[in-house]
Amino acid sequence: MAAGPAPGLGEDSPPEDSHPQGSLSTPVIEPSRPSGAVAEDGQRETAGASGSIQTSVSEPPPPDTSAGGPPSKGQPTRPKHRKGGLSFIRELPFLLLVAFVLALLIKTFLVQAFYIPSESMVPTLNVGDRVLVNKIVYHLHPPRRGDIIVFSDPHPADVSHRNPFSAFFHWLTEGLGVTTSRDKDFIKRVIGLPGEEVEMHQCIVYINGRALHEPYLDGRKFSNCEYGPVHVAANSLFVMGDNRDDSNDSRYQLGFIPEDKVVGRAFIIIWPPGRIHLLHGF
């Protein structure tokens, strides 16, 4: 009997089962991550109620707009609050009112501008000059010789009454130094003080018998050079213009000037620009 091939060893024999019957297939279990751990791909794994692992995609944090960059698409923009021209226009009347009140206070108590209308103080002051007058200085000390003072008319005439608007406008323009009245306010230089004797001979002024040095006259010669002597009344001043030939002063109608008529001392020329400088006495 011929021997045949061994069973299970022939060419047509079925391949061996890689998993023998009865053997158990062992699944590969990945190591678990802690609940809530983030995977490398940005997913978050959470343990479900049944123990199975669930994954959820984490939402990216909102963009930070604190650096001033443009907001992300769909994010509402905050309105920008800026003061525009309308706001300034609304505030303008109040600012003008405040400026006007301050101007009135300064004019009334501190400093006032005056316009020079005549040639009585040439060469020191010219027609059209504007000067500032210190109104508080004589609350600290009495007028001194050589001071250029502004004073009210010691012999005021009766004036016609103005309507309120006209009176206010005139008062305002005078305070700003735009206009002045020839008959209301005067500007002269203090020559004689209360109780002193004043006289003039050959265009030289003498105070109590001593010649007065007057550098502000700039060596000018005058024709009207004889006057006095007179004694200045108490609480009064003897004043003259630097232009001795063209000045209505204490030698004529004005007479002595009561100290309570003095408005203040002119201390600086503010107009025109080419003549801006301080005013000095002796």
Image (cartoon, grey):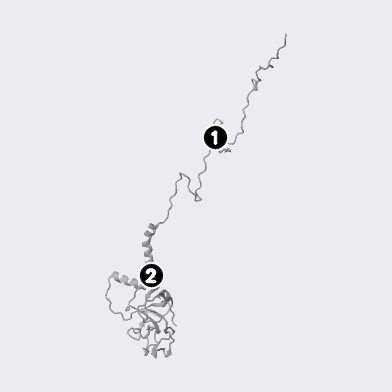
Q: Residue at x 38, y 66 (%)?
A: 99
Whole-percent x, y for residue 100 in the image = 37, 67
Whole-percent x, y for residue 81 in the image = 42, 53
Q: Is residue 211 rendered to the left or right of residue 179? A: right
- Mark 1 Cα-neighbour bin, 10 Å: few <14, some 14–19, many ≥20: some
Pick whichever of labels 2 and 1 is earlier in the sequence: 1
Quadrant position of the C terminus in the picture: bottom left
Label 1 SS:
strand
**Residue 134 in view (yes/no):** no
Q: Are marks 2 and 1 in contact (CB under 8 Å)?
A: no
Three-letter residue code for mark 1 = Thr
Q: Nearer the viewer, residue 127 or 238?
A: 127
Q: Residue at x 30, y 71 (%)?
A: 167
Three-letter residue code for mark 2 = Leu
**Residue 210 in view (yes/no):** yes
Q: Above or below — where is 173 with respect to 84?
A: below
Q: Residue at x 29, y 71 (%)?
A: 166
Q: Which quarter of the picture shows residue 10?
A: top right
Label ID, residue 105: 2
Outermost top residue: 1
Q: Which quarter of the picture shows residue 212?
A: bottom left
Q: Nearer the viewer, mark 2 or mark 1?
A: 1
Label 2 SS:
helix
Label ID, residue 55: 1
